[in-house]
Image (cartoon, helix red, strand yellow):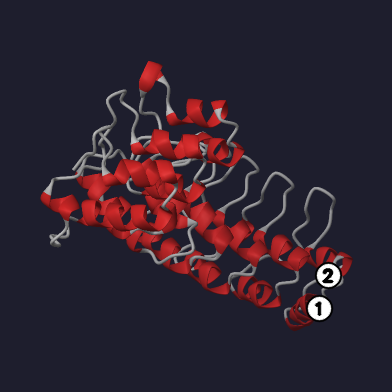
């Protein structure tokens, strides 16, 4: 349904900044609900444009409505679509001095990345069905799987992407894999899903750190457990660029439970880093008395030299 200026309800809502109405329209269009709605009855389309080829995303970028731009991106509209004079939504946001919109569009996130980060399962399914490529990287070098693995939602999207042949060992610009990010955020469900698809437990980023280093530094007990189970204690000896083991990183941050986990898994209590510091030195420097007590008691129990 269009008015005399070729506006559809979607285009008009985008230009006027009516985010609630637009969100409702997007839901109707995207999920194909057959309500007795004029929008559906008249076959309204997400990719509708004005006669000058301006899309809803162009209009929202020009009007400065960040919620609408976010909604349209999440629903799969192409941020690089060209409108009048070949201008993209980013061109219009810059011309109209919309810094929030410019930043959002400059993120380099394609629709699959956005939907994955937000945990929008149905949108991810639709995008994958429409041949969205799970291996495409954004300006950070991250794939949709990177964003899904570090998101604050459940692991459904991770499972969907892995089923679509997303690479569990893809690396970003810092050589971090999705498992690195899941470990950093303490997302055990994500980590388990990745591990079940044979993600490399001992992958190293540009600093030489493994997922276990990050899980230990974050005090993420459940992730540490998941990472340690099949490693036969080898992962506890991995050193990063500063020759720190996961036990060093746990001690530095004062994570006593993780320190005990690592010791029980065979971590070397007297391993020294590039400064010749042991985990006990690191714990003492940070004033982490619980970790110090665990290390001292463990050393006495195993008759291990500590100083």
State the SS at label 1.
helix
Q: Nearer the viewer, residue 221 or 61?
A: 61
Q: Earlier in the sequence, mark 1 or mark 2?
A: 1
User: Is 36 positioned to the left or the right of 141 in the image?
Assistant: left
Disc 1 + disc 2, Cβ < 8 Å = yes
Q: Nearer the viewer, residue 247 or 118?
A: 118
Q: Please count the marks in the image.
A: 2
Q: Nearer the viewer, mark 1 or mark 2?
A: 1
Q: Position of residue 127 (x, y in %)?
A: 26, 46
Q: Residue furthest top?
A: 85
Q: Position of residue 157 (x, y in %)?
A: 34, 58
For mark 1, does the 10 Å Cα neighbourhood hold few (<14), some (14 to 19), or many (20 or more) residues?
some
Residue 136, label in figure:
none
Q: Nearer the viewer, residue 225 or 37?
A: 37
Q: Position of residue 161 (x, y in %)?
A: 31, 51
Q: In which quadrant will I find the C terminus?
A: bottom right
State the SS at label 2.
loop
For mark 2, does the 10 Å Cα neighbourhood hold few (<14), some (14 to 19), or many (20 or more) residues?
some
Q: Is residue 159 visible?
A: no
Tell me which residue sits at (42%, 45%) in the image: 16
User: Is 155 positioned to the left or the right of 234 in the image?
Assistant: left
Residue denoted by label 2 = 306
Residue 125 in the image: above or below residue 141: below
Tell me which residue sits at (53%, 53%) in the image: 180
Tell me which residue sits at (75%, 71%) in the image: 254
Residue 154 in the image: above or below residue 110: below
Residue 296, label in figure:
1
Residue 191, quarter of the rendered image: bottom left
């Amino acid at each position: 349904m269009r008015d005399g200026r070729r506006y559809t309800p979607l285009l008009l809502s985008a230009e006027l900044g009516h985010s609630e109405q637009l969100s409702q329209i997007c839901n109707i269009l995207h999920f194909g609900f057959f309500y007795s709605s004029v929008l559906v009855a008249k076959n309204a389309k997400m990719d509708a444009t004005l006669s000058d080829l301006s899309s809803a995303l162009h209009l929202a970028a020009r009007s400065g409505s960040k919620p609408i731009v976010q909604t349209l991106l999440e629903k799969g509209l192409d941020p690089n679509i060209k409108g009048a004079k070949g201008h993209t939504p980013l061109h219009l946001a810059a011309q109209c001095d919309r810094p929030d919109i410019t930043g959002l569009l400059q993120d380099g996130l394609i629709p699959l990345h956005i939907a994955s980060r937000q945990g929008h399962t149905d949108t991810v399914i639709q995008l994958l069905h429409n041949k969205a490529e799970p291996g495409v990287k954004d300006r950070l070098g991250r794939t949709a799987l990177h964003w899904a693995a570090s998101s604050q939602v459940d692991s459904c999207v991770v499972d969907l992407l892995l089923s679509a042949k997303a690479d569990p060992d893809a690396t970003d610009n810092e050589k971090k894999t999705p498992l690195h990010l899941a470990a950093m955020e303490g997302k055990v469900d994500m980590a388990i899903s990745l591990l079940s698809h044979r993600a490399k437990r001992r992958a190293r980023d540009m600093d030489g750190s493994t997922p276990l280093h990050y899980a230990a530094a974050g005090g993420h007990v459940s992730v540490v457990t998941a990472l340690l189970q099949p490693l036969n204690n080898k992962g506890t000896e991995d050193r990063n660029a500063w020759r720190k083991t996961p036990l060093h990183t746990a001690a530095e941050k004062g994570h006593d439970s993780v320190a005990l986990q690592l010791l029980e898994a065979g971590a070397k209590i007297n391993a020294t880093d590039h400064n010749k510091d042991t985990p006990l030195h690191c714990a003492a420097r940070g004033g982490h008395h619980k970790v110090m007590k665990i290390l001292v008691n463990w050393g006495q129990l195993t008759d291990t030299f500590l100083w």
